[in-house]
């Protein structure tokens, strides 16, 4: 059976974009595709010359336009607020949250093809959207699902490389190691060694990216089954889509868990270019490192507790609340526990953000999923209470710029509900999803010929002298 989303929302979006300059460019070339052109590669090939011209024009006509001032605070403060990267696939608004090629999460949920009526978007559809800026048809998404399944053969040495690690190694260590082992198949590296012309770089990058995205769920589920299920691996089901298959290979055949995985992989995929994993992938790729090398580097950034590892930290923290205060903990007790965490010099995981200044829409759509599928889950109730209890406390601290929950505050209780209870594994799921955004942009990096990334750094002495001079 084939399900199509309504296209009337798309026309509404296009007319809204006429009034909103920020949206105009992203939605400018957004359209529903005709079902005849189902090959993603040839779609891209058609789009690339137009976008190359667009970049050339932008550079030649507006290259010297200033985008803002750099302050000492920005240099010392992790470059917050400093615009310094080109990232085509998504844009983050501090108040509204992420838009993928101009589409918000609720819009993606309405427009992207699903596996069942009113179901969650298929991540393959999002990959198509990120790469082409166009909403795919179900036929195109099915073709892409099939292509990904056809590319999903993981060489034996990858499993052996992972097996060389102690089974107790962190799942992210095992996963990143697996990705590095996949690198030996890089088409980009082979083509570069043969002297490929730079105008063709995007083609082997596309090959590597699609194969990498296709193989990640296999490697990720291997790691899961190795650590938690005595190494009993479940093979891919050739009748299932990307998200459904991933859930199934992990060992979950509940249709709601498969829907959750489709939603999960869709919403974690991309968060513009400045977050640690995307930025790392982009930086490493700017040295012409192939997609495997670049994505492995990105994963190592994702494994940090202030970034992707926060989803692990959230569930462990919630479980520690339950252990100390019980499942039906009162709001008063919750407040005490939050203060205890802060007073011991720790952050409250899942709250705050480097850019967002409101509740993360990725949190909101997971909350909606919970309200629909697991309203009575005790940990969901606890997460809902935390939504009320934590923000006023963080505001009281006086220094936290965003007291609201981010994506990681919610994901763990959903996974836990369906039996994926091993919190240390959660960041691997985030990693599988993030490959979609990083690789989509990487293909465009190569198509647009973006240069080596090399910002200027200075010493404290340089800054002191500069400020003294500026004051006189
Ligand atoms: N709990 C306690 N303190 C916090 C929190 C929090 N949730 N969020 C920010 N602060 C502190 C922060 O540590 C800093 O303190 P200090 O000046 O003593 O170093 C101060 O508030 C100002 O930080 P901000 O400017 O608000 O936040 P920043 O942009 O530096 O950091 C995060 C953003 C996300 C790293 C931070 O909010 C945080 O550590 N949150 C908890 C970890 C988390 O949920 N990370 C996941 C982010 C999403 N993701 O998946 O990547
Ligand atoms: C992400 O999804 O990468 C996180 O929300 C962090 C960020 O955007 O900085």
Image (cartoon, grey):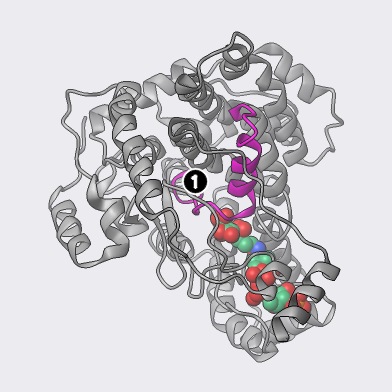
Position of 286 with respect to 99 (left or right) is: right
Instruction: Return the residue nearer the eye: 194 or 308.
Output: 194
Residue 341 position in % (x across, y down): 78, 77
Q: Quadrant of residue 283?
A: top right
Q: Is residue 270 magenta?
A: yes
Q: What's the magenta region?
A: 265-291
Circle 1 is placed at which residue position? 269
Instruction: Return the residue nearer the eye: 428 or 294.
Output: 294
Q: Is residue 269 above or below residue 240?
A: below
Q: Quadrant of residue 45?
A: top left
State whether residue 24 appears in this view. Answer: yes
Farthest front residue in view: 472
Instruction: Return the residue nearer the eye: 106 or 374.
Output: 106
Residue 299 position in % (x across, y down): 67, 41
The quadrant of the rendering that contains the C terminus is bottom right
Residue drawn at 62 percent across, 87 percent down: 395
Secondary structure category for the residue under label 1: loop
Residue 347 position in % (x across, y down): 74, 72
State whether residue 325 appears in this view. Answer: no
The quadrant of the rendering that contains the N terminus is top left
Residue drawn at 46 percent across, 40 percent down: 254
Q: Is residue 250 above or below residue 97?
A: above
Q: Is residue 137 above or below residue 336?
A: above
Residue 20 position in % (x across, y down): 25, 66
Q: Quadrant of residue 259?
A: top left
Instruction: Return the residue nearer the eye: 408 or 238.
Output: 408
Number of numbered discs visible in the structure rendering: 1
């Amino acid at each position: 059976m084939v399900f199509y989303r309504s296209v009337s929302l798309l026309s509404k979006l296009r007319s809204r974009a006429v009034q909103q300059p920020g949206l105009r460019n992203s939605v400018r070339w957004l359209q529903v595709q005709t079902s005849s052109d189902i090959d993603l590669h040839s779609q891209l090939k058609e789009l690339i010359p137009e976008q190359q011209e667009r970049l050339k024009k932008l550079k030649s006509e507006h290259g010297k336009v200033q985008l803002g001032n750099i302050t000492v605070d920005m240099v010392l403060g992790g470059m917050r607020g400093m615009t310094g990267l080109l990232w085509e696939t998504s844009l983050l608004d501090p108040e509204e949250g992420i838009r993928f090629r101009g589409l918000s999460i609720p819009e993606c949920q309405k427009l992207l093809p699903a596996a069942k009526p009113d179901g969650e978007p298929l991540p393959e559809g999002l990959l198509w959207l990120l790469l082409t800026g166009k909403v795919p048809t179900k036929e195109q998404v099915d073709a892409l699902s099939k292509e990904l399944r056809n590319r999903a053969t993981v060489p034996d040495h990858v499993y052996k490389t992972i097996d060389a690690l102690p089974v107790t190694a962190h799942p992210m260590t095992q996963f990143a190691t697996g990705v590095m082992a996949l690198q030996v198949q890089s088409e980009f590296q082979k083509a570069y060694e043969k002297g490929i012309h730079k105008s063709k770089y995007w083609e082997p990058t596309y090959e590597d990216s699609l194969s990498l995205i296709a193989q990640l769920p296999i490697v990720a589920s291997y790691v899961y089954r190795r650590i938690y299920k005595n190494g009993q691996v479940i093979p891919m089901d050739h009748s299932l889509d990307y998200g459904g298959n991933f859930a199934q290979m992990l060992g979950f055949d509940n249709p709601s868990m498969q829907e959750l995985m489709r939603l999960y992989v869709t919403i974690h995929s991309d968060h513009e270019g400045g977050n640690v994993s995307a930025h790392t992938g982009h930086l490493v790729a700017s040295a012409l490192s192939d997609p495997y090398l670049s994505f492995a580097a990105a994963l190592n950034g994702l494994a940090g507790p202030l970034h992707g590892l926060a989803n692990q930290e959230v569930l462990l923290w919630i479980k520690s609340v339950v252990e100390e205060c019980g499942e039906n903990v009162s709001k008063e007790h919750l407040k005490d526990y939050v203060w205890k965490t802060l007073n011991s010099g720790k952050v409250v995981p899942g709250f705050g953000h480097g850019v967002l200044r409101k509740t993360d829409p990725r949190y909101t759509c997971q909350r909606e999923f919970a309200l629909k599928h697991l309203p009575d889950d005790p940990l969901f109730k606890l997460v809902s209470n935390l939504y009320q209890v934590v923000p006023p406390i963080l505001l009281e601290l006086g220094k936290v710029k965003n007291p609201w929950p981010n994506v990681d505050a919610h994901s763990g209780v959903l996974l836990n509900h369906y039996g994926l209870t091993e919190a240390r594994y959660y960041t691997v799921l985030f990693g599988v999803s993030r490959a979609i955004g990083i690789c989509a942009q990487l293909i465009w990096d190569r198509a647009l010929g973006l240069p080596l990334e090399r910002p200027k750094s200075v010493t404290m002495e340089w800054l002191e002298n500069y400020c003294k001079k500026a004051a006189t």
